[in-house]
Image (cartoon, grey):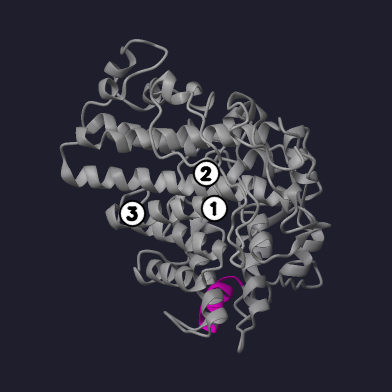
Amino acid sequence: MKNIFKILPLAALLTTASCKKVLEVEPQQSIDAATALQNDQDVNSAVVGCYALMGGGALYGTNFLMLPDLQGSESYCSWRGTFQSFRQVASKTMTRDNAEASRTWIAAYRAINNANIVLANLTKVTDASLRTQLEGEALFIRGILHFELVRLYGLPYDPATSNSQLGVVIKTTAATDEAAASENIPRSTVAQVYTRVLTDLNAAISKLPDDNGTRADKYTALAFLSRVYLQMGNYAAARDAANEVIASGAYELAPIPLIPFTNKNTAESIWEIQQNEQNNAGQANDGMATFFASLPGIGRADVRMNTGFIASNYVTTFDLNGKLIDSLSDIRYRDWYYVGTGARPGNTYCFKWNAFEQNLPVIRIAEMYLIRAECNFRLGTTVGNTPLADINIVRVRSYPKGVLVSVTLSDILSERVRELAFEGLRIHDIKRLKTATGSFAWNDNKLVFPIPQREVDASLGVIVQNPGY
């Protein structure tokens, strides 16, 4: 794909992620991976560089978490900011040069290319255990990024069809020089992309350790695999992957729902983006807190919550003085939503995203319980637990008086909405459940991102643009 990989040659990755000697390698335009990556430390640093890219605003630092909610914003939230690129996402009026569609595509393929560079240089790693771990991490990164891309830039996966609609370009080889960067590769079908994703994630699971600190481990890959299978409507496989994560005993719900968003690397988080006061997406006028928060000195308050959505989804009981009575109410209402006091005060905002330096939970154990409950219910099975028990595990944490004595599919899906609101799953659930957002059906072309036009032009038409752009 011309232009994508020219933007971030291997030098750019290793400038930020590796040792000093790499900075001195010539020539400046491109670096031979055989020269740049020479030992265990170099390859490990390259993987760290991949995580750094994924934490940027174009990927999990903002766009993978915020854009799916903006796309499904009807009766959910609204964009009130001045950035036209985000406004176009929310209003479904994106052009082929939309800045968010372009930067997300480019950043994702940068990270994919860097993962491929790691995979091409594993022989440089002399420590066998480290080599296996780094291979697993690179496969995980490549797999989840192809998954995120195909969900945004291709029509939805539909288990009732062959899924021959165009997805995205599959990249499994490293581009480290001008010739490789200029190679024109057509888009694969949605079915082919999902096959690639499953192959990478299953391979990653077999290679990653059970515990890898704050980096991806076996259960991170299993949790994403569960997401992938759920999106595909493969309920048995989604159930089994979620069940394996739960059965590991490595994760547990925090006592109150706010904890995973105000504390870092809790037992509830399966994987989260690492941020701190010196290194976070918000300092570059990006980031989740920047767009979601309306707190003194924090946030632009660009994403406003729909009060009807809040009122209809969370049980709230007040005393005569207007105070929320916790024992009768859904604590998520109190902990996750508030009336802003900073930018654009007086409106309702989501406190999940509350500080520039907070870590960003990408996938939590609560989601695994919800997936297992939904899949068991659909299949009439009780693998790991009953659907009723799983829903009550999630529900009672936040609503102590809300124990259910029976459960329906609607109950399960509603609990999923309440628990995972504003975590980047909105439009993906609309698509897999074949519902709608406002007047836009689940498979409307307006809910598909444009391929950056510069990529279409540079490929001389080998990369085909999406309909309507």
Disc 1 residue type (three-letter): Phe
Mark 2 secondary-structure assignment = loop
Q: Reply above or below: 147 against 287.
A: below
Image quadrant holding the C terminus, namely top right
**Magenta-highlighted stretch: main secondary structure?**
helix
392 magenta-colored: yes
* Mark 1 residue crowding within 10 angstroms, few (<14) / some (14–19) / many (20+): many
User: Residue 358 shows which numbered tag?
Assistant: 2
Residue 332, visible in the rendered structure: yes
Which percent across, then down, holds residue 102? Answer: 63, 32
Q: Residues within 10 Å of mark 3 (few under 14, many from 20)?
A: some
Give the amino acid at mark 2.
Gln
Q: Give how far across and how far down residue 400 sits, in percent.
A: 59, 77
Q: Relative to the observer, which residue lies in front, 159 or 9?
A: 159
Q: Quadrant of residue 131?
A: top left
- In magenta, the rendered stretch is 388-398
* C-alpha distance separating marks 2 and 1: 7 Å
Return the residue at label 1. 261
- Residue at 55 percent across and 83 percent down: it is 388
Distance CA(mark 3)–CA(mark 1): 31 Å
Image coordinates for residue 21, horizontal then vertical, percent: 27, 16
Of the residues under marks 2 and 3, which one precedes in the sequence?
A: 3
Q: Earlier in the sequence, mark 2 or mark 1?
A: 1
Q: Which residue corresponds to the image point at 58% horizontal and 45% vertical from the top-left?
A: 64
Mark 3 or 1: in front is 3
Q: Tell me: 339 left or right of 269.
A: right
Which numbered disc flags the more N-terminal residue, 3 or 1? Answer: 3
Residue labelled with disc 3 = 203
Which residue is rendered at x = 74% and y = 71% of the image? Answer: 316
Q: Are marks 2 and 1 in contact (CB under 8 Å)?
A: yes
